[in-house]
Amino acid sequence: MTGGATHPSADLNPLDVRAYAAQGFDLRRQGKLTEAVSLLQQGIARFPEDAALACEYAWTLSDMGDGAAAAGEWRVIRQRFPTTLDGYLGGGLQGRRAEAYDTADAIYRSGLARFPDEPALHVDYAWSAEERGDQAEAVRRWSAVRERFPDLAEGHLRLSVALLATQRIDEAEAALAGALERFPDHQEALIEYAWIAQIRGLWPEALTRWERVITRFPELSLPRRCGATVLLELGRYAEAASVLAPAARMLPDDPDVLAVSGWIATRSGDFKRAEAVWQIFRERHPERADGFRGGALTLRDQGRWDDAEAALEEAARRFPDEPSVAMDWAELAERRQDWPLAVARWRDVLGRFPGLSGAHHGLGRALMGAKDFIAAEAMFTAGRQRFPDDEDMAAAEAEAAAKAHNWPRAIALWLMFRERFPGLARGAVALARTLRDSGELEASVTQARAALQSFPDHLDLEVELAFTLSAMRDWPAALALWESLKAKHPHHDGLRSNITFILGQAMADQAIRGGAPFEIPRALLESANVDDVPAEDQVALLKRFESLGDSCEFGMVQRLYQVEQMTLLRWAFTTPENLIAALKTRFDGVGDPEYTEIDVIGDEYRTRDRRYFMQSHTFTSPTAEPLEFFAPEQCRRLQWLKRKLLDSLTTATRVFVYSGQGGLTQGQITALHDAMLPYSPKAKLLCMRVKEPGHPPGTVERLRAGLWIGYLEKFSTVDIAVANWLTVCQTVTEQMES
Amino acid sequence: MSDDIHAALTAIFAKVFRRQDLVLTRELTAAEVPGWDSFRYVSLIMATEERFGIKFSDEDIDGLKNVGDLMDAVARKREA
């Protein structure tokens, strides 16, 4: 210890050892560290045996950042005053600051041997593991703290943080829930508890929890920001803005608050406001990428892709080290379906940020888009090896193998997935699907049934089993399972959609086979709003109509009445503009292999016309027909169906139906009819709209000779307004005949 | 039943359904042929049209209930 020039204050009693310690402490607290050191050195010279003075001196050296000197002092203190707690606390802290965690832990352990019931030592010992990054050890030490000192909120809170860091999210949440029972108003615990729900994507629950924090601490900005972000995810934009408003008033220049405000405007489609917010952001915080990203994505969401490109290019130039900008730019190429560009950009992102799992995912997705399934799989394999806990990566790898129709590999990967993530039903679900797609129907059924033992009543698993039984045309078993699923999940839209689809297949089988070798359960028919025995006049009525798209809704209505027309557009999605273009060129190129894309979606081949962008169901499973047989035959079928459509347009005996789910203007309706008239002056078109004031559901408006608008309660391929359709078709027929 | 129509349809069915063991009788219906769905039905009609150089109308197709109906429709079209 060296002497100093500082004089103690005039009122300090040089004989009072506590006065040195107290004044040294005050000086340290005021940040006058040099003065504190000088004073304390004088005190120590006078009272060399006083432990409190020695400790105050060591704390001051520590605060000055003189780690080596502080560590030396703490060592001396532990030797000279082994029963002084600070020697262990200070020495341990000094070790942690120097990242000498082994030394720190050794000091804490010797302290704990002497002071086994001292909470501060236990707490610091746990901090040491946490700061070292040994989260498993941190979990053990924080667990011990919580157990020994249950009234210490820190033990509960830090345990949950350590559990989160080890991905033990359920336990982290339970620890926090326990903490909140004991400390219901603990700010950090409340925030962590809400944050867990948010990172799990449990948006309604996260919202409830953030509301609790906001109610308890209305002055805090962070809960409002997070609450607004959750509302944003839920699509409740007005409420998000309302929750954020007080934070925006309190901290109008806070970049985090401003960013949430910008995202609310962008995501809600309030593009004018979004552009204004992002402009302000860029002016006030030009050092942050958010303003440039937000501005660019606002342009992107308006469909101004060239402008978005330019904005992201500028952002990438300004923020070359910002991964989110590089990812946005690569993702824009993906949205534009410019696959070579997307691959190049994602490759660049991955080269610069190899530690980002999103970059592996992005490049894999772009390669999938480019239909380079083998390269995509290799990418996902590399990603899986680097991020072994990323279940999405492992799943993408298996899906890429399936896309490449490398069935043995896909099955092996799903088996590996199931082994790696045994608690996830996703692996068993996908394995059942992949076995079915590969043609291993029996194995798929066996596997699904076995997996249901581990995941009883798992909806997706039962759906896969039902699909496989349907693919086997084991209709009695399949329909019974679909019926039981409908009973268990009566309001599940996705399930209803699947049932309607399957019902279509089953009814088509019945219609084509000319009999009823199996019963379709009444409950399933009710879900499709149709009677099981259609009246003959309804069948005859619906045969007089033919669908032109834009969805498969009218095709489903016909199928529900066992009207199985062989027509091109019955199962097609078409836009009015593309349909008009196709009519004007007499559907030139439809069915040419050059213009026909075939993809597998779910358990079905779908076709897409590259010129007119018509997308169509085929109701054909890859298990029933390998692609190498299906593709050429489907092109021939499309060409034949095109000829049939041209014949039908020319003879003009049928009324063509266009559903117009996207909403049709009168201009589009007349333009569509105009495009049909060159085929025949007798061309008849019925376009559909959702009910309007003055046009209740089931009514018909005649625009001109051969052109009608029909009104429905709603458009839906799941819950079809069958009665409206029948009434509209009946009215049009009567008007034609009158 | 005309023998040449029967022989030609047997070959068409074998190709469309990839089944060499199908025995075509007049009474045979879709219910008895695995894989006879609406898309295979299109392939069947297409192949029949191509083989016999005929074109079926929508009404012709609507009236087909079994193989016998198809044979009769082919015969009628050839005579027309």
Image (cartoon, coloured by chain):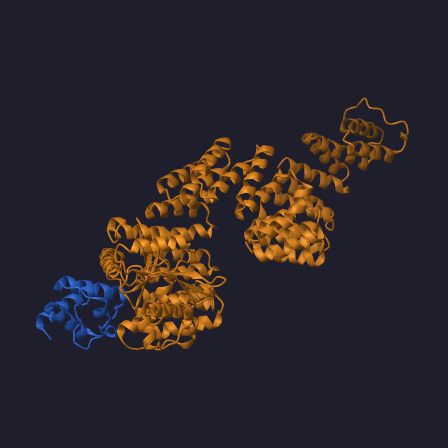
Chain colours: A orange, B blue
Q: Tell me if residue A493 can be seen.
A: yes
For the C terminus of chain A, which image quadrant? bottom left
> x, y (%) of residue A11?
91, 29
> x, y (%) of residue A206?
60, 55
Which residue occupies 71% across, 50% down?
A217
Work out which residue is located at the far top of the displayed protein and give it.
A5
Query: Is A409 left or right of A194, judged from the image as shown?
Result: left
Q: Tell me if residue A465 can be seen.
A: no
For the N terminus of chain A, which image quadrant? top right
- Which residue is nearer to you in this view: A509 or A354? A509
Work out which residue is located at the far left of the displayed protein and give it.
B3
In the rendered image, the vertical position of residue A519 relative to residue A444, given as above or below:
below
> x, y (%) of residue A536?
32, 77
Query: Is A598 left or right of A101, judged from the image as shown?
Result: left
Image quarter for residue A522?
bottom left
In the rendered image, the vertical position of residue A682 relative to residue A370, given as above or below:
below
- Which residue is nearer to you in this view: B73 or A82? B73
Query: Is B39 left or right of A156, judged from the image as shown?
Result: left
Image quarter for residue A726?
bottom left
> x, y (%) of residue A281?
58, 36
Which residue occupies 69% across, 33% down?
A71
